[in-house]
Amino acid sequence: MTQTEIRVRRPHWAWFVAGVAFIALVGAAGFRAAPSVLIDPLHHEFGWSTATISTAVSINLLLYGLISPFAAALMERLGMRRVVSGALVLVAAGSGLTVFMTESWQLLLLWGVLVGVGTGSMALTFVATVTSRWFVRHQGLVSGVLTAAGAAGQLVFLPVVANLAAHSGWRTASLVISFTALAVVPLVLIALRDHPSEVGTTAYGATADIPLPAKTGRIATRALQVLGRASRTGTFWLLAGGFAICGASTNGLIGTHFVPAAHDHGMPTTTAASLLALVGLFDVVGTIASGWLTDKIDPRWLLGAYYSLRGASLLVLPHLFAPTTEPPMWAFIVFYGLDWVATVPPTVALCRRAFGADGPIVFGWVFASHQVGASIAAVGAGLIHDHQGSYDLAWYLAGGLCAAAAVMSLRVTSQGLGKARTAS
């Protein structure tokens, strides 16, 4: 009788890296958004104004975007494992130390700066770095799944934090966030690797080793040098401009003003908030699907389609608001949710193809423009409402800007954009 050797095929190490990255990104999204459900408890205990507490949230959001390119450069210098572990420790410290707060400036430092820097170090540039180093096949799909982790984090984590804050107090909620962040650190240290060569393999789907970028001594210098080179190309400004409009038309406008706009038309706030939560649910599906499509279709065409459809939906939104939720509004919620951050995988792919090894850092700067656009839209829409008594003009302007973003995406030059290295 002839014995046959049975080999058990072990999963490629890239999937372990992607799994740990997903967990870290889910946590980062939940940690970043958690302060929004702690505003009322902090106001009632300390008497701090909503504006003061919101300032901490604003600092958090701004750093979440602006720290990204520097975090990508730091990952080149120190490695993903060290940076992500350090970021989780910062989040744990920023959240845990809040139980000792007595002054409002401490809130700005802890929730604003420490948590902002920590979560910003695990933002979408982390996605770009993981996919660039560890995946050749299925890059778009993995980008979509990891990007969807952000929406999943808020959907899973925020209700838990809100429930803890309501029944056990905000200090308990803060400590749970702190311990959760620390619990992820061992997983990062065990499974996250900076490069396939560390475990004697190549990137998933690669036929040859992908070299690491050369290490530089100064992190800020590296990030700024990449910005300097990228800013001399039209491709960078087209991508950054389009992504700024993306941020303006999602987080800045819908994320900030959808609930009060619906309430202006007689819809209960709880109903409007539930609709916004559904947007996040469909966002997970849409982003993963977008990642899959990015592996198969020119990313420029995808972005053109996404922005065009988003702009059209915003133009009709003012006519859908009503005291009750009618079928057209349900259709908007489903459609807009599918399109919410579907733009991320194609944008990551274009940065990687146009700028090569600098792609993750370039995407960090493009993502920073996303957050700037969101900030401008959040303030601008509020001013429009204050002066005109409605948000209608804000929706129409956003629709027009999305049309401009579609044109910008389609005008991204094909020069320097290589074809996908492998089919999915």
Image: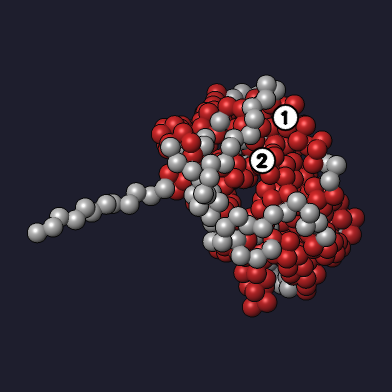
The quarter holding residue 103 reads top right
x, y percent for residue 167: 46, 43
Residue, far right: 387
The quarter holding residue 360 reads top right
> Which badge, 2 or 1, comes first in the chain's sequence?
1
* Residue at the spot 61% in from the left edge and 23% down from the top edge: 102
Residue, far bottom: 327
Q: CA distance from mark 2 to mark 1?
A: 12 Å
Could you say whether the residue bearing mark 1 is in a helix, strand or loop? helix
Which amino acid is tagged 2?
A: Ala
* Residue at the spot 72% in from the left edge and 27% down from the top edge: 220
Say left or right for 33 vs 156.
Answer: right
User: Within 10 Å of the Cα at label 1, are there few (<14), some (14-19), or many (20+) other Cα atoms?
Assistant: many
Could you say whether the residue bearing mark 2 is in a helix, strand or loop? helix
x, y percent for residue 276: 63, 60
Say left or right for 412 vs 42.
Answer: right
Residue assigned mark 2: 357
Tell whether label 1 touches label 2 (CB within 8 Å).
Answer: no
Residue assigned mark 1: 222
* Residue at the spot 56% in from the left edge and 31% down from the top edge: 79
